[in-house]
Amino acid sequence: MKKGFVQTANFRLLKEAEKIVARRGAREASLVLIQGKYGIGKSELTERWASENGHSFIRAKKVWTPRAMLEDIATELALSVRGSAKDIENRITQHLAQTMQALIIDEADYLADMKGAAKLETIRDISDVTGTMVFLVGMENFPAIVQRYDHIASRVARIVQLNPLDLADVQVTCKAKAEVALTPALVEQIHRDSKGRMRHVLNAIANIEVWAEANSWAEVDVAHVKGRALCADFTGHLAAVRDRGL
């Protein structure tokens, strides 16, 4: 598979949101929530976006404590993690206030749990003090989690809904990534079978390339892959097993 990043419609949504929030009126309204289904490529998309724009990308972890979160953010910013949690937070806020470097936190659903939203509160404090933009990337219900906390929800400048890839996105992806020619009909099948999930699209391309190499196919059409699973879907497999009564 060819290397490189594909700028899909979701990528353009992020760029648009960044421009709008950068021109916001209220300084403290600096949080952007990014939501979307699993498998549509949120992590790869936002990590690449961070890299291209000089933002800092941090992936939240389920085992994070407030201090562990601060240490990971400080490490990403090349700051010391010595001293108390407050010392680390102060270094982060001083750095961001000077650089105005945006933060992107993936798997942001982990910022709030049954014990409360201490980690989300800390992120709110950092964005309030510095005015830097913070993009929180979560699953479909993530905005509903944030909405439980009115004082934090009031800081949300924008909610970006990332969508499954449309046919045009899949066409662009196949052209940019596949090392073997794919017919338009096969690309359409990839779009249908993947349900617009980037993870499945890339898996389909990888599978087709293996089959094409093994069979010396210069171009691959629907007929070549008839009866083959282009992209494995674990949940779909389980549903099929249940339907068969196995």
Image (spheres, helix red, strand yellow):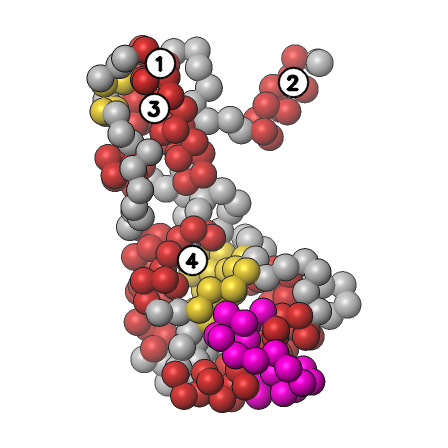
Q: CA distance from mark 2 to mark 3?
A: 28 Å
Toward the right, the furthest residue is 115
- Amino acid type, callout 4: Glu
Disc 1 crowd rating (10 Å Cα; few below 14, some 14-19, many 20+) is few
Whether residue 149 is visible to the viewer of this picture, yes or no, is: no
Q: Does residue 5 lie above or below 185 as drawn?
A: below
Identify the residue at image location x=45%, y=44%: 40
- What residue span does the magenta drawing correspond to? 72-90
Please state which amino acid type lies under the numbered disc 1.
Ala
Q: Earlier in the sequence, mark 3 or mark 4?
A: 4
Return the disc, 4 or 2, that comes first in the chain's sequence: 4
The location of residue 129, given as percent across then percent down, is 51, 88
Residue under numbered circle 1: 214
- Residue tagged 2: 241
- Residue at 65% in and 13% down: 244
Residue 212 in the image: x percent, y percent?
Answer: 32, 17
Q: CA distance from mark 3 to mark 4?
A: 26 Å
Secondary structure of residue under mark 4 = helix
Q: Secondary structure at mark 1?
A: helix
Residue 96 x, y percent position in the rendering: 45, 83
Q: Which mark is residue 209?
A: 3
Indicate the quadrant where residue 195 lies: top left
Q: Earlier in the sequence, mark 3 or mark 1?
A: 3
